[in-house]
Structure formats: C-alpha cells, structure tokens
Image (tube, helix red, strand yellow):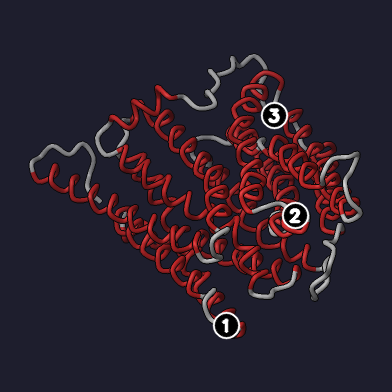
Amino acid sequence: MSSRRSPLLIIFFTVFIDLLGFGIVLPLLPRYGLHFEADKLTLGFLMASFSAMQFLFAPLWGRWSDRVGRRPVLLIGLFGSTLFYFLFAVVTQRGNLGPIFGLSPVFWLFVTRIGAGIAGATIPTAQAYIADVTDAKSRGKGMALIGAAFGIGFTFGPLIGAAFVRADKLDAPSAAPGYVAAALSGVAFLWALTMLPESLKRGVAPAPGRKWFDVSSLRRAVGLPYVGWVLASIFLTTFAFAQFESTLSLLTEDRGISDRGNFLVFAYIGFILTLAQGFLVRRLLPKLGEFRMATIGVALMSCGLLGIGAATLPENRTVSLALLFCVLPVCVVGFSATTPSLQSLLSLNSASDEQGGILGVGQSISSLARILGPIAGLGLQKWTVAMPYWFGAGLMAAAALLILTLRGARQGHAAHGTATEPTV
C-alpha cells in the first residue's frame, strides 16, 4: 500500500505547487494586458490562448507519455511552466519601459500564455500517472487528488500573489508575482526530478491516441437520444463561467479594487469552490439526483450572474462591493453543482461500450467553451462592464430549459417503458 500511496502524494504535491503559479498569474493577466493597451477583444484572445493550447496539446502529450513514459512529459511541462512564468515576469518588468526587441508587450504576453498553455497541457498525463499506480477500486479517489490540487492551488495561489503586490493602485504592474510563480514551478520541477518515479510499465502497448477534435464522434454523440441536449447544456454552462472568470479582474478594477484586493477576491472564489466541490455537492448529489442538482445549479448560476451584473450599477462603491461579495458564492456554488451533474447525466445516457468516447466528446465541448467564452466575454465588455454577466444569465436560462426538456423526455419514455436508463 505504501508503495502506491507515495507516488500519489508526490504527484499531488507536484501538480499542486505548479497550480499555485497558475493561480498567481491568472488574476493579473487581464489587468496587465489592459495596462499595455490591449483592447477588450485582444484580451479575450489572450485569455483564450492558454485553453486553446491545452485543447491542442493535451492529446499530443498523452500519446507521447504512452510511448516515452509519464515522468519525462511531466518534467518537460514543469520546466516549461517555469520558463514561461519567468518570461511573464520579464515582459511585465521590461514592458513598462516600452517595446521589447521592437515588439509590443502584448505580443510577448501572448508568447508567455501560449507557452504556459502548452506546458500546462500535461494534466491528463498526471491523470494517466494516477491510473498507472492505482487499482480499479482506488482509481476514483486517486483522480480526486487532481481536483483537490486545482481547488487548493486556486485558493492559495492568489493568497501568495497578494503578498507581492501593493494594496494601492500603481501606475505600472509589478513583475514580482511572475517571478514568484516561476520559482514555485521551479520547485515543483526539482521536486519531481528528485522524487517522482516512472509509473508506466514497459512492454505495455500504447492505446490509440485521442484526436484533437473528432467531428465524427461529435456527430455520432449528438445523434444519440438525450446526449445532444446534455452536451449543449455543458457547452452553455462552461461558456458562461469562462466569461465570468476572464472578465472578473476588470470588473473588480472598475469597482476600484487594487491588485492585492483582486488576488483576495480570486482566493475567496477558490475557497468557495473547494468547499462546494469537497463537501456540499459531494453530499447532496446522491440525495437530490442529477436532474435536480443540475437544475438547481443552473438556477444559482443565473441568479449569481444577474447579481454580479447588478453589482456594477450602484455608484456607491461600498454598496457595489458588498453586493458583489454576496452574489459571487451563488454563482460559484451553482457551477460546482452543475458540472458534475451534467457529466453524470452524459454518462448515464451513454451505452457502457461508448462511455469513453462520449465523455471524451464532453471534455472537448468543455474545452471549446473555455476557448470561446473569454473571447465573447471580453468582447461584450467593450459595451458595458455588466454585459457578459447579463448574457451569461441568459445562457443559463437556456441551459435550464434544455435540462427540463431532457427530464420531461426521459420521464415520458420511462412512462411508456422505453427508457434505457433509470430516471433520476
């Protein structure tokens, strides 16, 4: 047992330390881009570039790890994160003085995010590592470590970043958080280099690699009863939340929150996300069932996004911020409830011999939503700060209709004795 537990703890700490760097850089990126005179649409593409690279390179890293081993791929990813977070700090520092090698700081920010996205696309390799060192009985608990690393990293990363920026508003962004993120990823690299053993058993033939985006699989999945509705719901909810994530830093700036305060807002969100996923949703989902939980989740998200939009309206900033901090948990808890419920519904409506393929399509749909959401959200923010949240609330209303329609259709089939899965 100890031989299995040790690699799990090592991979957990490796991913966790690396994600601290991600949690430090993400809240700053929209503000720094705006400081370097990027327009809102360009900021949208900047925020989307990280997810786009993960979408493209995660299958590539996964296939390569099947051939050369998990450890080399993870080490390359950690080294790449260290390098590109360091470059982010250099760009921030040098960009305050003007163009770098004749190119605008915004161009170099794109370079840092594209590079960090390629390096960070090794999370599925970490999941494959866990699959290598666990048996079927303990697989789920092992995979949960990645989710825990995300939640804790997204909570403590902003808290660490807050210690390296001033509480007041500065004319020039600070490079210190970028250097700290690079240092943390460097520590993760050294930790993995010295502590992480290889998990891939030699002589095992690699499984066929997943395509970047398999259109034929998508077409087949959408053609299955109910699956298309679930996939559409997944896209809408992820799209709306991606809008929220990418625009929040500029909303808090509009409300007069400093860089340090902005870090604390993101830490607040990470803490709520961790509590909701680790305690609330995990306990309520088996009792309420997927349909009720998904419906409650999209309703909470819709109310939360409407509330965030309303928080931009009061001229009194004290009232505005009080409202913002009250409604942020509503949106975050709603997303925490919706995501696992929809994933479970996707699985429940798939045949046992199609689970992997259908869930893979669901992951691709989520990735596309995370690419397109920031572009749309920051593009909409050109008109008004509140626009992405009003639009997101409308998307949640559409998702609620899809889920209720799906539930009604399943109950109708069940009443006629044609349901293939139990109605929940």
Q: Give amino acid for label 2.
A: Glu
- Direction from residue 287 to residue 384 in the image, left or right: right
**Residue in the foreground of this view, choosing between 424 and 369:** 369
Residue 282 in sight from this viewpoint = no
SS state under label 2: loop
Q: Which of pointers 3 and 2 lies earlier in the amino acid sequence?
A: 2
Residue to which mark 2 is pinned: 37
Select label 3 or label 1 by which is in front.
Answer: 1
Residue 14 is left or right of residue 296, and the answer is right
Estimate how packed mark 2 is, as few (under 14), some (14 to 19) or many (20 or more) residues with alpha carbons within 10 Å: some
Q: Amino acid at mark 1?
A: Glu
Q: Secondary structure at mark 1?
A: loop
Q: Give the residue number, with chain letter if any, for mark 1.
A: 315
Q: Quadrant of residue 195?
A: top right
- Which image quarter is the N terminus in? top right
Residue matched to label 3: 70
